[in-house]
Amino acid sequence: MTISYVGLGSNLSGSMTDPRQQLNKAVQRLSEHPRIHGIILSSFYSTSPIGPKDQPDYINAVARLHTELLPLELLDYLQEIEDEHDRKREERWGARTLDLDILTYADLQIATERLTIPHARMEDRAFVLVPLLELDADFFIAHGKSSAELLANCADQGIVKL
């Protein structure tokens, strides 16, 4: 089994429910996969959008899970869950019903057109680092910097624990 951290975010209500409920439903779907186990979910956080400012605030969280899926299999499953929540990929960093990102996958480093692990921008995002620290106060990203060190360098990004 491999430990992976997955970022979850939503700032639009979809046909299913509001953003908080969508995150809960996404975690439920993750737990239904026979090759994903032991999911631990951080608290939810309200965060200001990083991209266009003319969109609602996000609800974000991070899930720690054990998986037997290979990285691309996990990515495929995450995108399947996003599609079930009417995810549209129209505007970079735009509003979305559900966003699921592989943040880390053990200590693996991948850089392909389709997948980058560790997630390319996670070290600049308080909405990733704060929930990561909640789940693992000693978390280190592959290049050796702790989440706490990286968070100290993040500008105020308007994150509030719900």
Image (spheres, rainbow, N blue to C red):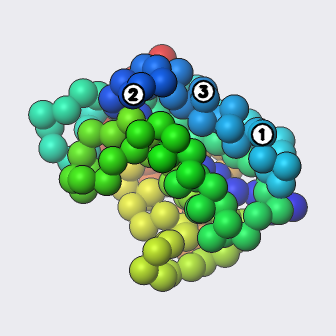
Q: Which residue is mark 3?
A: 24
Residue at the disc numbered 2: 14
Residue at image coords 24%, 46%:
94
C-alpha gap between disc 3 and disc 1: 13 Å
Q: Residue at x 59, y 62 (%)?
A: 75
Q: Quadrant of residue 97?
A: top left
The spot of residue 138 in percent (x, y) is 68, 50
Label 1 Cα crowd, 10 Å radius (few <14 / some 14-19 / many 20+): few
Q: Depth check: 67 or 106 in front?
A: 67
Query: Where residue 68 appears, x then y in whole percent?
Result: 83, 62
Residue 92 visible in the current orientation: yes
- 73 sits to left or right of 145: right
Decide which of tag 3 and tag 1 comes sooner along the chain.
3
The reply to whether dot 2 and dot 3 touch (C-beta < 8 Å) is no
Tell us which disc is closer to us: 3 or 1. 1
Say whether residue 32 is left or right of residue 142. right
Q: Is residue 26 above or below residue 151?
A: above
Residue 120's spot in the image, x, y percent? Answer: 42, 67
Q: Is residue 115 left or right of residue 50?
A: right
**Label disc, if present, on residue 32 of the rendered structure:** 1
Residue 37 place in picture, x, y as percent: 83, 46
Q: Secondary structure at mark 1?
A: helix
Q: Would residue 71 appear left or right of 128 to someone viewing this image?
A: right
Q: Identity of the amino acid at label 1?
A: Glu
- Which residue occupies the foreground of this view, 99 or 147? 99
Q: Earlier in the sequence, mark 2 or mark 3?
A: 2
Residues at marks 2 and 3, CA–CA distance in whole angstroms:
13 Å
